Amino acid sequence: MKNHKIIRGRGQYLALMASVCALLLLAAGFSVSIGAVETKPIDILKIIINKISGGEWFVRTWEENMETIIWNIRFPRVIMSCIVGAGLSVCGVLMQALTKNALADPYVLGISSGASAGAVAAIVLGWFGFMGGYSTIAGAVLGAAVSIILSLNIASYRRRITSSRLVLAGIATAALFTAVTNLIIYGGNSGSDKTKTAQYWMVGSLSGADWDKVKYVSIVFALIILLIMLFVNELDVLLLGDDAAESLGVNTGRIKLVIILAATALTGVVVSVSGVIGFIGLVVPHIVRTFVGSKHKRLLPAVILTGGLFTMLADVVSRIIIAPEELPIGIISAFIGAPFFLYLIKKNRAK
Amino acid sequence: MQLSVKDLDYIIEGTKVLDAVSLCVEEGGFVGLIGPNGCGKSTLLKNIYKTYKPERNAVFISGKDVMEMPPKEMAGEVSVVAQENNVEFDVEVLDMVMYGRYAHRRFLEGEKKEDIELCRQFLREVGMEGYEHRMYLSLSGGEKQRVLLARALTQQSRLIVLDEPTNHLDVRYQYLIMQTLKKQKITVFSSIHDLNIASMYCDKIILMDRGRIVAVGRPEEIITEKYMQEVFGVRSQIKVNEITGKIQIYYLSDNCKDC
């Protein structure tokens, strides 16, 4: 790594972004085409063009249920995987800027578990019923808010956050909220599928994706990205530490509040549609930083695309590895993320 | 521009670390802060640049209470070279120096050509030309310190506050850093470990002991055998150097019979 240089030229950066985009499209195409029902790539393309344009450009030569499978099941899932991955990666970047620690991400800090507990409370106990279809999101965001406050308070000591305190605070917070989730599911008489429900919320899965969820997750995601892109300069300086940032003129109280609000909302919304998918916010930013550096104006767009790609590929793996059954994506991400986490801890100690 | 501190107390966990500290740094001055370890130098400086929150009506810059100043305005007046400067996420040297321009940028404004020129100019002044695209964490201690000085100068404030900027540096860089500071048209307030360096560069020295200010004056009035004995507890001999005309301090060991 010593001689590895980060990309500085604008052309090189754009070329990298373009290639990640191309890979993203390829992965999306591949992801839509795999599954129990065999499909021809050309048919998929035709269906998507017809659907997006709203017209009948191509005469239907395929069965109607295939059209439903492609458009209403597989396609929203692909988009969802992309947004969930991008969202979790952005949350990772935000938590890392907040704690100045590469080990921070919503899963490690226990925020995902908090959001998951909130979502389950909303579904099983009927919290936020007045919000109708949005009650799950409301519960998840509330859970994320409670857990982020708890976790950061335990992690910081005299305004500093050390790696060991951060990891311990995350373990404790996650344990607490996982217990809450289990208590609600097993105590809430929610029917016969308790184990399955519990597993869904704790391991993370994209199997529930549909267009409705895609719609609101993407709206929230877009709004939050717009918000934090306004603060890229502040995020850069904040990485130097709160004291240094303050003396350089950054209103650290304000930027930290923006980070906490954005990360809470984004984690809450993402978890409300996918459960707890771990480590993405840890792995993706770390890899992307080695290529584009830590300046947020470049880091954030790169992390969004790469996070989307990474998660889309993890989803593909989760669907083919034991086909025709599928694994929850959280298992795949943990198999990649946990060793990576160990590596980071080891590296951190060497420093 | 003038920095003044009036009757500042500061308590950390029940101990009075600063006890009714009052001082004044005049525009254009080069003022050194000396005193034994643990006498409160760093605490005083941290109160001035607000890493610690001072009481209201205690620290003033150009007559304004620092606690009333928003961070950007404060950064326009005071730049800081602090002691602890660890970063977790590495950046290139040029970017590190560029952060000094943050306070001068409007909301969302990017890097201007003049800003980059300014960064390069100050990197040249601290002898770090050609290091623009090196990673900050790959630098040696002396190089890092010089980059941070360049960053503080790039901030183009009227006052610079430094906390033992030459600590842990070898002789050459100690002098290089002080020399660079002396050349700037900027008011300097710095705690200084090495008393010979303090006497050489400062036009006023503030001596602290146990949270209080003991004496203020020109180097030859403060760096005296009497104060060395009373405050630092060391015997010394002080002479005027023939070449520099500045005073020079020699420490005498206790088991030296002839002195």
Image: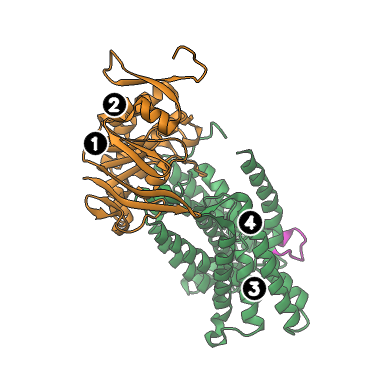
Chain colours: A green, B orange
Q: Which residues are magenta?
A: A319-328
Disc 1 and disc 4 on one polypeptide chain? no
Mark 1 and mark 2 in contact (Cβ < 8 Å)?
A: no
Q: Is residue A326 left or right of residue B213?
A: right
- Subunit that carries the residue with mark 4: A
At label 2, which amino acid type do we have?
Glu
Mark 2 and mark 4 in contact (Cβ < 8 Å)?
A: no
User: According to the image, label 2 marks what residue?
Assistant: B220
User: According to the image, label 3 marks what residue?
Assistant: A117
Disc 3 and disc 1 on one polypeptide chain? no
At label 1, which amino acid type do we have?
Gly
Q: Mark 3 vs mark 1: give the one in front.
A: 1
| Residue at (41% x, 52% y) in the render | B10
Q: Mark 1 vs mark 4: give the one in front.
A: 1
| Residue at (61% x, 55% y) in the render | A166
User: According to the image, label 1 marks what residue?
Assistant: B29
Q: Nearer the viewer, residue B159 or B116?
A: B159
- From the image, which quarter does the N terminus of chain B lie in? top left
Mark 3 and mark 2 in contact (Cβ < 8 Å)?
A: no
Q: Mark 2 vs mark 3: give the one in front.
A: 2
- Subunit that carries the residue with mark 1: B
Q: Disc 2 versus disc 1: distance between alpha carbons?
A: 16 Å
User: Is label 3 in a helix, a strand or a loop?
Assistant: helix
Q: Nearer the viewer, residue B22 or A308?
A: B22
Q: Disc 3 versus disc 1: distance between alpha carbons?
A: 60 Å
At label 4, which amino acid type do we have?
Phe
